[in-house]
Amino acid sequence: MFFATAVDLAAAVEFSVNGDVRTSFFSLNREDRDGRETSTHEFRIRPRFGIGAKLNEQWRMQVRFAGRYSTDGSKFYFEIFDSIPAQDGLRQGDATLDEIYAEYHPDSAWEIRAGRFQSRALLRGVTEKSLDREDSPFTNITWTDGVQIKYKAATGWNTTAIAQYNYPDGPTQVRRAPLDFRDDGSRVSYFVSVENTQKTGPIVQRTVDITWLPDALHSRGIGAGAVDDYWAAVGRLAAQWPFGTRVKFLLGGEIGYAPSVPKRYVTRTGTIGNADGLATQITFNFIDIVPRQSIGLAFGRVGDGWLLAPTFNDNVYQAEVRYKWDINKDHTLEARLRYNQDIKQRTNAAHRGVKTSTIFCVTRSDSSPGIPRWQGLECQEHTGSN
């Protein structure tokens, strides 16, 4: 009887396959802070393949493999990591399971997800970046371990709340020093976002995010002095207008502020005073300059006390131009030129750092019936360690 019931349940499960493969050519030219000039040119690939199981209308599960590889001498290594082994995620040559979760939909308004999953909070546009939360940009691989609850109100306002686990040996996302999670009180951090993307006049996005990392900020250096909570608030606003007969112009802005910041001697951007907890970006996007092809310009400034940005270093001015071609529903081509420059010269450096990078990227995405297509397949990369 039990065996027959188990067979019937297994037969009722709907399995599906989903994923994407991103290939790119990456070129980086940099003037290091010691005055040396270096360059890197390589091909990169990130395959992600998942298996989904739909148990019924309320429950589904997902497991996904993700690997990060490069022509620049990558070795092949697989591990189900706890924390990310490098500052921007997995190292070249690493692979892991970046999704292992169960999802429950009690009704059309609520979604509850628990386990390991991807999370992001992006400014709309061609460049589509974030000051506070974006798992796995470009060919990077990061993840969120925890519980996520989403609620979609009839008014168009969507609320996302995340309780995220942080391992003692490090985070699962980009978190910059002197953020550290060795203290027991830092084991769980929190993120809440309220967003509306229903069009109201020209407005197409309104968002407010709050991030709280208890006992994670070592403002006087790791192991020196008291440990503080790190708070950060982010607001996003985007508006869109017609530009001629076919083109649409989208203007987007994002601002973030962290009231508790490290000392400047800890971030090595000065000898006295506190670091700057302000971060901003503004984007100018021309959508469908020809059908399915768009161009975006983005300008950002991130202070030395803003420690959350996944695609910006702290202490940086950034300018970027990006071209995007949605070839069809499964293929996207992007080309991007980005310039980064230190705002303040590091106290241990002879010069301010300058980096120029170029990326050509093609993404192929697939999904079986019953599994949503992956969102946010934009070409980004973490800008490297400071």
Image (cartoon, grey):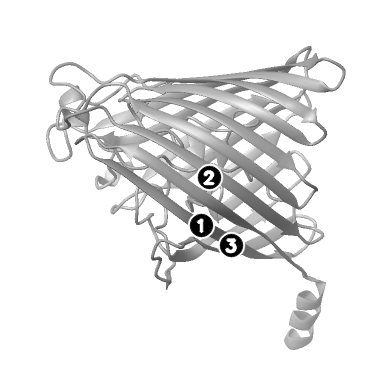
Decide if residue 111 is in sight here. yes
Give the side of residue 168 with respect to residue 198, left or right. Answer: left
Q: SS for tag 2?
A: loop
Q: Secondary structure at mark 3?
A: strand
Which amino acid type is shown beneath numbered disc 2? Pro
Is residue 349 or residue 148 the one in the foreground?
349
Disc 3 crowd rating (10 Å Cα; few below 14, some 14-19, many 20+) is some
- In the visual, does 69 lie left or right of 351? right
**Which residue is the site of mark 2?**
137
- What residue lies at 43% left-to-right and 64% top-to-bottom? 94
Q: Amino acid at mark 1?
A: Arg
Residue type indicated by callout 3: Pro
Give the farthest residue toward the right.
245
Residue sitting at x 21%, y 28%: 351
Q: Secondary structure at mark 1?
A: strand
Q: Residue 229: name its quadrant.
A: top left
3D distance between C-alphas at marks 2 and 3: 13 Å
Residue 38 in picture, x, y percent from top left: 31, 44
Q: Is residue 224 depicted above or below 329 in this figure?
A: above
Which image quarter holds the C terminus? Answer: top left
| Labels 2 and 3 touching (C-beta < 8 A) | no
Quadrant that contains the N terminus:
bottom right
Task: Report the disc number at residue 44.
Answer: 1
Neighbor class of circle 1 (other Cα within 10 Å; few <14, some 14-19, many 20+) is: many
Q: Residue at x 60, y 48 (%)?
A: 361
The picture places residue 34, in percent across and down from the top left corner, at: 19, 36
Pick the residue in front: 175 or 192. Answer: 175
Which residue does the numbered mark 3 point to in the structure image?
47
Along the line of sight, which residue is nearer the eye, 222 or 33? 33
Residue 237, given in percent of the width and then of the height, sits at 62, 18
Q: Where is residue 304? Give x, y as percent.
A: 30, 25
